[in-house]
Each structure stands twice: as C-alpha cells, then as structure tokens.
Image: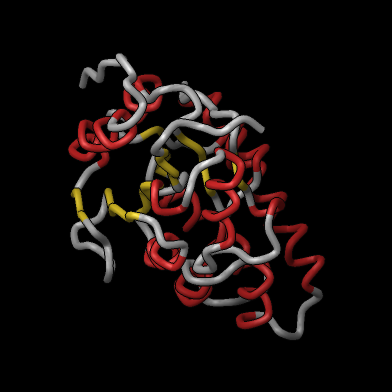
Amino acid sequence: MLPGPGKCVLFDVDGTLIDAVDNQRRVWGTWAGRYGLDAADVYGVALRTRPMETFAEVAPDQDPGECLALLHELEDEDVRSGVYGAFAGAAELLRALPPRSWALVTSNYEHRVRGRFARTGLPVPPVLVDAAAVDEGKPSPVPYLLAAERLGVRPEDCLVIEDAPSGVEAGLRAGMTVWAVNTPTPAPGVHRHFPTLSEAAPEILAFARSRTGASARYSS
C-alpha cells in the first residue's frame, strides 16, 4: 500500500460521527431483557468491554455464542430501522478532508458502519478498522496502530478523535494525539477537548492539511 499523507485523522464512529448512543442503549436493554438482566447494569459493562467480555461478566451461565448471535440480530435490525443521525458538521468535515488522510476505527462491524453511513450520507474512507480486523479491541492500542499502518503513517503523525474513555486510552497508548468531542467533560489524558464535533471540525481539518498542501476548504 502506498504511503499516505504526512498527517492523518483516525475517527471513532459511534458517539463521534454517528449519534447512536440511544440506539446502543436500547439494543443492550432489549438484549438484557431477553436474559432477565438489569438493562442499566448491562449497558454500564458494555460501555467499557467488548461484547464477549460483557457476556462473561453479566451472563456467565449463558452460551456466549448464543449471546453474540442475539446481539448481532438486534444491532443489524437497528441499522435497518433505527432512528439516528450524523452529528452536525460530520458530513462536511469528512468530505473536506484530503484523500487518504483519514480512517475509521470502530468497535463495531464494517457492514453496520457502511449501513449507517449510507443512511446518513457520510462518505466511507478506504481504510476502516473494525472489530473483525483485530484480536484486541479498545482500550488496546492495536486498532489505532493498525489504521496508521494501513495509511502508511507513523503513530505520532495521527490525530485520534474519540468520545469514550476506552477509545481515548487506546489512542494515547498508541502514541497518538487524542482529542475528545461530543462530551461535556474530557476523559483523562486527552490533549484537547471540544464539546461538539462541529466546534472541533476546523481544527481537525487544519491538522490533516498541515503537511499535505491540500487545497480543500471546510465550510460549516
């Protein structure tokens, strides 16, 4: 793969570009109800662990394969019929970024990301690192390091855009610059914090263009 531009932006998806927090809560709530579990407790665990780890903690007596199959069924249905949208400014920002200067790094699966992006009008970049691409998910640095490798850039030349503490930790452990968006207060360790993605957008674009010489313009 040819090397990418000098600096790249690596975006988390849910909670960062796509406003699907309520959808995730509903999916996990429905899943919890099928097993007679407390929805709030299950969702609290799901926020900080991967699904198989969540099942092991909240439903250790259940078959993890069946647990995962049900979760996939519920999430796929949400992609088809759920109500959600892109955060303000997301589409304009992604379209303004120089080609091969950005990637998606998600704990979800590629087909769901593509389904949601199609419904919200967001462009999909050539590099997308999903849950199936790595053995270790966030807060491990592996997903972000893989994205940098696929883009052909050094970790220190990458900017991570995140909303969740586990993603922030993953970016920091990867040796990257990490900015938090769409949160009232930043997670520990972030280099900059923006209450909304739209407020961060001009700075994100400036970072991506800082060594590319790109002529793309951002308009809010």
The answer to whether one can see residue 88 in this image is no
Q: Measuring from the top left, give residue 183's x and y in whole percent.
A: 25, 55
The answer to whether one can see residue 123 in this image is yes
Tell me the residue at 60%/67% (across/down): 50
Residue 218 lies, with reference to residue 81, above or below; the image says above
Q: Is residue 61 left or right of residue 21?
A: right
Residue 209 lies, with reference to residue 192, above or below; the image says above
Tell me the residue at 46%/35% (across/down): 102
Q: Is residue 44 left or right of residue 193?
A: right
* Front residue of 76 and 118: 118
Q: Is residue 3 left or right of residue 88?
A: right
**Displayed quadrant of residue 69:** bottom right
Tell me the residue at 23%/59% (across/down): 191
Residue 18 lies, with reference to residue 193, above or below; the image says above
Q: Measuring from the top left, give residue 210's x and y in whole percent.
A: 28, 32
**Displayed quadrant of residue 33:** bottom right
Q: Measuring from the top left, give residue 37's x and y in whole percent.
A: 59, 77
Which quadrant of the rendered structure holds the C terminus?
top left
Which quadrant of the rendered structure holds the N terminus?
top right
Tell me the residue at 57%/56% (across/down): 143
